[in-house]
Image (cartoon, coloured by chain):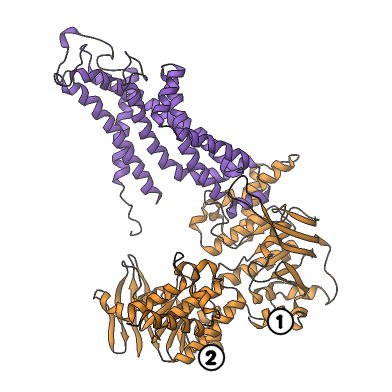
Amino acid sequence: MKPGRKKQNPYLIAGMAMTGSAAGLGLLGAFWTPFGTTAMSAAERFQAPSLRHLFGTDNFGRDLFSRVMQGMGTTICISLLVVLFSAFFGILLGALTGYFGGVFDEAVMRVIDAVNGFPSILLALVMISLLGNGRQNLILSLGIVFTPSYVRIVRSEYVKLRDADYIMRARLMGVGKLRILFVHILPNVLPVLGVSLVIGLNNAILAESGMSYLGIGVQPPDASLGNMLSDAQGFLQSAPWYALIPGLAIVWIVLGFSLFGEGLRRLGE
Amino acid sequence: MIRVENLSVAFDGPEVVKNVTLEFHDGEILGVVGESGSGKSVTALTLMGLVADNARVTSGRILFDGQVLLEAGKPRDRGLYRRYQGEKMSMVFQEPMTSLNPTQRVGLQVDEVLRLHTSLSPRERKEKVLESFRAAGLSEEERIYASYPHQLSGGMRQRVMIAMAVILHPRLIVADEPTTALDVTVQNQIIRLLKSINEKENNAMLFITHDLNLAKRICGRIAVMKDGCVVEQGTAEQIFLHPRQEYTRRLIQAVPGRVKKNRSLEERREPGESLGEPVAEVRNLSVYYRESGNSLFDRKKHRCVVQNADFEIRQGESLGLVGESGCGKTSLAKAILGMNRDVEGKILHHTLRPQMIFQDPYSSLNPAGTVGWLLMEPLRAQSAREGARPMTKEDMKEAAYQMLRRVGLEDSYFHRKPSQLSGGQRQRVSIAQALITKPGLIVADEPLSALDVTIQAQIMELMQGLQQELGLSYLFISHDINVVYRMCDRIMVMRQGKIIEIGDTEEVFREPREEYTRQLLAES
């Protein structure tokens, strides 16, 4: 690379554009949509995409563009909360187990092994059936299911860094344990964690859509990309756009975050 | 005849080797000396045809007995090179651990050279491998033949590498820092071995090193490289006695010979008169090493790494600690710093808690912080601990800037990150970080080993200056006897966990009491 010339990072730009547009539409959808997300119109059922209804309408005559806006907002928001939840506990547990080791480490890691022993979606399903439907429970159960992978990533970094010269030195200066954990070590873990957070966001989006598709996530009449897909499956032949549009929206967001993650990774190199 | 003519090599950017001309004669060792980044390794790798694919030869050529091996503007002929590599020229690398395959017995790895280049039968090959092991000074050659690299010591691994390099009796052997990763005593054996091989085989040898002292001992001719250019070339005598270039002169001066620079401290005290009050007393200290098991239920093993150490460090003195790696130097240092609690005996500190300067300036500074943050962090920790009279942020900043200037760095470095600094600059920051809380005692664990010679001299000067200015005491750990001689007032020799000799540097150097000490001194 020649000095002075900036490295092109098309991944980051494309990823930011795609996720940015989705998040922007979703955010806007929380306050304003062209037709309202629940406004039905018997006269306009099953309309194909047109200038009036950009994405067409569904079996109740609801505007799909409005619903996709809301659905994207819901999906992104839930996934973000899931990732934040699991990242928070992942960092906390990973830091404590990795740095201190010992019995606590063994105990936590065996619990995590146990959690990992079940298919994650199945485990989330069981938890929701115990806790009951609803957004909070969805976030909680997906968050718990996603936590172990972050604990592992963070823990392995802490194990590596706890014996680094500069950490030994911080101990020698008499820096407090908490400060070593979260001020001295954590910034050096973040680059590794950042990429996996973005990948985790993708998994969370897919998981949320899956759960809502199965009817145990976001409840109607609220729109989520998953439950829209589920509603649409009876009309695949008569109104193909009805299923296609929420499906493409999921692809758009996931692809966007994948590119964003790749872009971040390259930026770090 | 083997010649490198006007060779220039560039990677994606500017040329890293510029117009280098070297000539190799049979039975002569040519030394290429220079600091890191001077292009000496790239020259050697290009000569060997091992340089990375993105390297371009922009001018010159390489001649090997009339055959043009490489010429500017023409792509590297891999087939041609393959015939020369191993058979007519071979290489010994710096790190014998990484240049041997850890999953294969070393005998088979040497055998592979023969399998590729000769048509000998397996039995003849084995006989030849054992013979070359003997030639490389390895006894018990059968056992070594069947050993894996991790079962051998560093010196033995390097001997295996040398056996591998000489087995086909090549015309040219390139040795790239072959002793840098080894202990002093082993270093000398390897040097002697290379020299005797050179005499016996009457081949040409290229010896690359950053250590002028080594070059002086082994090389017939020396080329000094700087920034990709050969600045001076001549016989070893010419270079050392009549250096023509300013840079060569600087390099030679930077080499810590047996000259005492630290005069002022000597003048301060009469010989025999004791120094100031002790800042730290170590009384009958034994340090244990606990090999931690992988599982929760493993029995932990106890091993004694330092036995009954008993000494004190006095106000304003530098106490040198020498010994081979693995003799317990670092364990002792860590115990004194209070970082190893698995000890018996007593350590008394009479000043603030001691701080440490590490060997590797690349791993001892937190890469996430700026220089300013790194310097303020010890102060923050200190005021958090004391609590009574916390320093304000402005005070800390001011102290950090002052310390920065004191170690010879400009204010603008305050906002830089360690990754933007050179090795020497990092070591300066490292020193500043250790000194900012004004501890009375600094433990310096090989603080110069990772640095270039000219930088070494600067850091040594800085450490001595700070010592006089602040009345510091150093516990100075090093494997380099010459550095210790120059830096230290007293010297302590350790062997296999025991302190076998302790005394005034001059006395120990003049008349060492122990045989082992004599050996250490003789070999450097």
Q: Quadrant of residue A143?
A: top left
Three-letter amino acid code at disc 2? Glu
Determine the colour of chain B. orange
**Residue at the spot of label 1:** B518
Instruction: Measuring from the top left, give residue B64's x and y in whole percent.
Output: 32, 86
Q: Tell which of B40 and B107 is nearer to you.
A: B107
Write the residue at 31% across / 39% down: A15
Check disc 1 and report its element: helix, strand or loop: helix
Instruction: Measuring from the top left, give residue B405's x and y in whole percent.
Output: 61, 58
Q: Is residue B431 above or below residue B119?
A: above
In the orientation shown, which residue stands out farthest toward the right? B273
Q: In which quadrant is the C terminus of chain B drawn?
A: bottom right
Instruction: Measuring from the top left, give residue B232's x and y in whole percent.
Output: 46, 84
Q: Quadrant of residue B8?
A: bottom left
Three-letter amino acid code at disc 1? Arg
Apparent side of residue A255 relative to residue B41 in the rendered image (left or right): left
Measured Cα–Cα span from mark 1 to mark 2: 27 Å
Q: Circle 2 marks a residue in which chain?
A: B
Determine the colour of chain A. purple
Check disc 2 and report its element: helix, strand or loop: helix
Write the residue at 56% across / 73% down: B182
Q: Quadrant of residue B41?
A: bottom left
**Residue at the spot of label 2:** B237
Instruction: Measuring from the top left, give residue A26's x and y in whole percent.
Output: 32, 24
